[in-house]
Amino acid sequence: MATFISVPLKKSSEVDLVKPLSKYVTSTYPAGDEQAEYIRAVEELNKLRRNAVGRPLDKHESALEILLRYYDQLCAVEPKFPFSENQLCLTFTWKDAFDKGSLFGGSVKLALASLGYEKTCVLFNAAALASQIASEQNLDNDEGLKNAAKYYQLASGAFGHIKDTVLSALNREPTMDIAPETVGTLSIIMLAQAQEVFFLKATSDRMKDAVIAKLSNQAAEFYGDAFKQCQYKDNLPKEVLPVLAAKHCIMQANAELHQSIIAKQKKRFGEEIARLQHAAELVKTVATRYDEYVSVKDLTDKINRALTAAKKDNDFIYHDRVPEVKDLEHIGKAALVKATAITPPLSQKFSDVFEKMVPMAVQQSMGVYGQRKADTVNRLVGTMREATNLCNGVLASLNLPAALEDLSGDAVPQSIAEKARSIVQQGGLQSIEQLIKDLPELLTRNREILDEALKMLDDEETTDNELRAKFNQRWNRTPSGDLYKPLRAEGANFRNVLDKAVQADQVVKDRYNTHCDMIALLCKPESELSAALPSANPTKTLQGSEVVNVLRSQLTQLDDVKMEREALEAEIKGVVFDMSATFLTALAKDGAINEEQLSVSQLDQLYGEHNQRVQASLRKQEELLGQIQTSHQEFSSLKQSNTEANQREEVLKKLASAHDSYVEISSNLREGTKFYNDLTEILLKFQNKCCDIVFARKTERDELLKELQQSIAREPSAPSFNIPAYQSTPAVPPGGPTPAPRTVFTQPPQQMPQQTQAKSQPPARPPPPTFTPQAASPTPPAGTPTNNPPAVAPPSQAQGPPYPTYQGYPQYFQMPMGYNPYAYGQYNVPYMPYQATPGQAGYPGAPPPAQGYPGYPAQPSQQQQQQPYYPQQ
């Protein structure tokens, strides 16, 4: 009765966690102490897996602690890395725990790029090891009983957790050992065994019979539920079913035994006998059907002794009526066991090696927040830059401040000279032309990287589609077309970005071509620039006028506004705030992050004041520009107007506009160069991501191809067919002897002993049909033709088992069952003449040698006549 069911562990292939996780860490986090710490944590995680999965584990609590710690670490690391088929792809391969050849129709092993699959298999191993540890406990002391109950309940909870989560953790059909119906059955079995341990504890403590009966009856119900699930689903080894059936009967018999004691105490002697009889029937069933699995000798003796004594007392003293079993009152139930809830951490001393790494939800929220922050900064800075460009355009159209500086009409205005020197210091035309020349090369490089990445996806998807068309439903992995949708969307977005960048480059080139001549003029020495400017009549009379002073004051205020904007832009770009703490708090509190609400609220607090200052600067600029335009109209009316003056003013306007365009074009080209260089790094990461997933898919493809080839090799090469009856089971003549039963070999041929496989000697020939005097036919009159075969003599050897039937080789006839290829003389067996039965007429004599029997073929040769005729068995 001490037989308990334990579960074998699953076996896994080795997986290198260091390379892909370290690659992700180095590409995600900047170089420094943080990155180095995360790489060390990755190595520790890989070490944990090797200890938990890569070596045999002892049936000890320390080994279970290693498994639970690895499981806890997987649960902790899962939200911190983007584990998926199209991002961080890690393929885990696990074998079926119950695979023993043909016991299961499912996959022998399964490889999946899913951390949830790894967690499920590790938890299965933890539950299996807990069942093994529990089965090794000494149930003769309280400590052993306590530990066994604890580990059985842990195993039950783990199997139940897998039942609830396995389908959501996997995106395909699992192997049979972790299928929901299998682990559900195992969970009930472990719970039943834990309940049985409580029954044994109550029995050893000599608790009340009512309590023991309820505990035993509850265990019987658990075993019965598990038996029903195994009976209709062939999902566990065949040895489990008889053990469950036996345990169900044993627990029910114990319940009836202890309930009979209660009936005796209540002086219900008929009920006592009825329950003992039922218990005796139950243990008899176990003894006759499941004796090789569970021994019930002691329990049988105990029940029989109690039943004999109860019958004796009732027959001689009480004479109480024995009721039917169906009329007995049902025994109560008491469940003292409960499946342990699986809530990480499960190990006693767990510490997260990635404690400082924020979860992926926080990382994603941080990424979106960073984009929102960048959009806010770009919007504010862009608004100020547009206002500054508008201001410069208005001043250039008014030829300010050059008009105020060119009152002499023959010298280069100071503002124009400063702008010319600024252009020369920045490199002049050569720098712009070099930047424009570099853009196509950068663009081509980025296009090549993107095209190569997408080509890898296309090639792998084409191969996957070809294999899917070849193997049809057997090719049961995720289609590459579905898996690559996010990557293709990302690639399409990159291509769209490049197309827009090409359009922006063309706009910059067109603008450069428009102002190229004026920029070239500004790059010349000041003497050449002065000679290129048209001369005008002097207007020195306006130098001390009030209009000129007002215009200069207004321009000075406008310059102050521009300087304030530059300082404000630096302040806006310098705002720093870490949102990770806010997101972590929200995740811990609500289990989810409302990124939009938190980000918008925080950005409003950070940039609300800056936004107000930007709007105030715009309003002040608009006011100043209005005043400057009014003052300029008055200034223009006072100036002496002539053709030369107008030509000079137009050239000065173009020079001022060319300087502003040069500054803007240079800025745009440098931003474009930086954009292409940054995009190159992003595209390289995208290319690496595509390369990693294609490599993982190729590995998975090779593994699946190997499995398919093995399964195809195991399949029969030709369809099965039915052998004709006359070849497999020859007909037995009426009245013939019944053949002895054949010996069935349950051992595989390759495991048979050598002498079994060797060719054995043929057994002795079976005897001919026997005839009784009543069944013998009367002697026919002389001369009457007869169709009887010639008489044969019975053999002197004992009858042995007949030969089995073998299917003949092509173009060869099958030997009859009684055929002996050896001559009798070889064994010195005397020929026994036929002895007639007393009182029975003899058989008619044979015809002359040259004359055969009517209706029969020719007589056989002399050697064949020595062999008697036997009917085929």
Image (cartoon, grey):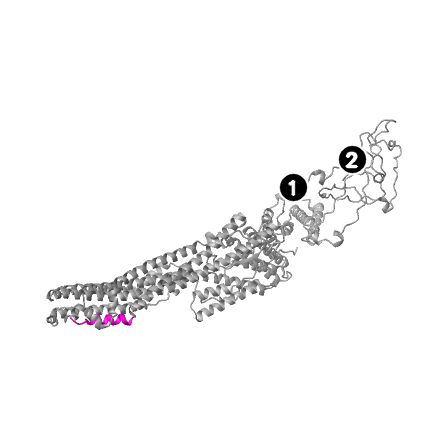
Say which mark, if any, is on residue 212.
none
Q: Position of residue 341 (x, y in %)?
A: 52, 58
Q: Position of residue 12 (x, y in %)?
A: 57, 59
Comparing 553 with 633, the one in front is: 633
The residue carrying pointer 1 sits among few (fewer than 14), some (14 to 19) or many (20 or more) residues within 10 Å by Cα, namely few
Q: Which residue is mark 1?
A: 721
Q: Position of residue 238 (x, y in %)?
A: 63, 50
Determine the residue positioned at 74% across, 41% down: 814
- What amino acid is found at the position of numbered circle 1 in the picture? Phe
The answer to which quarter of the image holds residue 109 is bottom right
Q: Which residue is mark 2?
A: 735
* Tag 2 near tag 1, CB within 8 Å: no
Residue 282 appears in the figure: yes
Above or below residue 635? Residue 729 is: above
**Which mark is in front, 2 or 1?**
1
Disc 2/disc 1 C-alpha distance (Å): 32 Å
Comparing 328 with 417, the one in front is: 417
Q: Residue 411 colored magenta?
A: yes
Comparing 153 with 434, the one in front is: 434
- Which residues are the magenta region? 410-426
Asked if residue 634 lies left or right of residue 335, the reply is left
- What amino acid is found at the position of numbered circle 2 in the picture? Gly
Secondary structure under tag 2 reads: loop
